[in-house]
Image: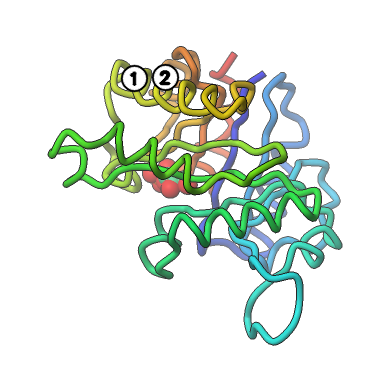
Amino acid sequence: MKFIIGNWKMNGTTSDKELLLKSLKNVHTDNKVIICLPFTLLCGNDFGTTIGAQDISEHSNGAYTGDISGQMLTDLDVKYVLVGHSERRLYHNETNQIVKAKATAAIKNNIIPIICVGETADEKNAGRTMSVVKKMVLESVPNSGAYIIAYEPRWAIGANITPTPDEITAVHETIFKTLRGIKKENTPIIYGGSVDAKNAAVIANLDHVDGLLIGRASLKSDTLLPIIKSVK
Ligand code: 13P
């Protein structure tokens, strides 16, 4: 079983959601499919697909205008939440410490956080990928509870370019060893960044790759279904 997780980012209306989730209903797969929707689409899931959110407040309730708490997500039957996506880190100044607090809030509410890490192009070019990713993992994970790590190199997001299979394996192995060092070696590690129907099966079957996190190609059934079907 591999995780196939869609991240809709700031896209989609109720009819888009209905179209995609209806099409997923008839797909037979051993993979665990999860679609992380914008907050506005989390209410009312009659289609059977597991849904996730894209962010969670680190606070439990109170005067935090515009924020959404773990209790509010649980109330809508949300089981997974992305935390520390590179777009949140970049546009909302989320640090590893904030990401850890958000992941901790998710676990407190029985929601599994999908903790995103990944180096920038400059960090990659400086040969710092492994040290950057290792630090992000160690500083972003909660002290206890189950979570998923998503490796998303920033330079591969929305770019039609992916690391080579060897590069992905090497980073995932580093993440695996980092997690083993804190006795979390059973944590799933998924890859994200320009995944499509052409590269999904190859990437998903690499060593230490437990699934995929998919942006653009998760928005429509004609791009998502071939990915789900190709990953065995
Ligand atoms: P793309 O698949 O569109 O490159 O996005 C990746 C991503 O950021 C998923 O979280």
Residue for point 49% across, 54% down: 84
Residue for point 60% across, 61% down: 55
Write down the quadrant of residue 1 in the picture: top right
Where is mark 2, residue-wise? 173
Q: Residue 108 placed where, x, y %?
A: 78, 54
Q: Is residue 111 left or right of residue 150?
A: right
Q: Is residue 80 visible?
A: yes
Q: Is residue 216 above or below residue 222?
A: below
* In front of the other: 160 or 73: 73
Q: Residue 161 placed where, x, y %?
A: 26, 36
Q: Is mark 2 within 8 Å of ligand 1?
A: no
- Where disc 1 sits, the SS reads helix
Question: Pointer 1: residues within 10 angstroms few (<14), some, or many (20+)?
Answer: some
What is the image's colouring?
rainbow
Where is mark 1, residue-wise? 170
Q: Residue 34 placed where, x, y %?
A: 67, 40
Amino acid type of the residue tagged 2 in the rendering: Glu
Q: Quadrant of the C terminus?
A: top right
Residue for point 61% across, 59% down: 102
User: Mark 2 near mark 1, Cβ–Cβ under 8 Å?
Assistant: yes
Residue for point 46% across, 27% down: 178
* In front of the other: 72 or 184: 184
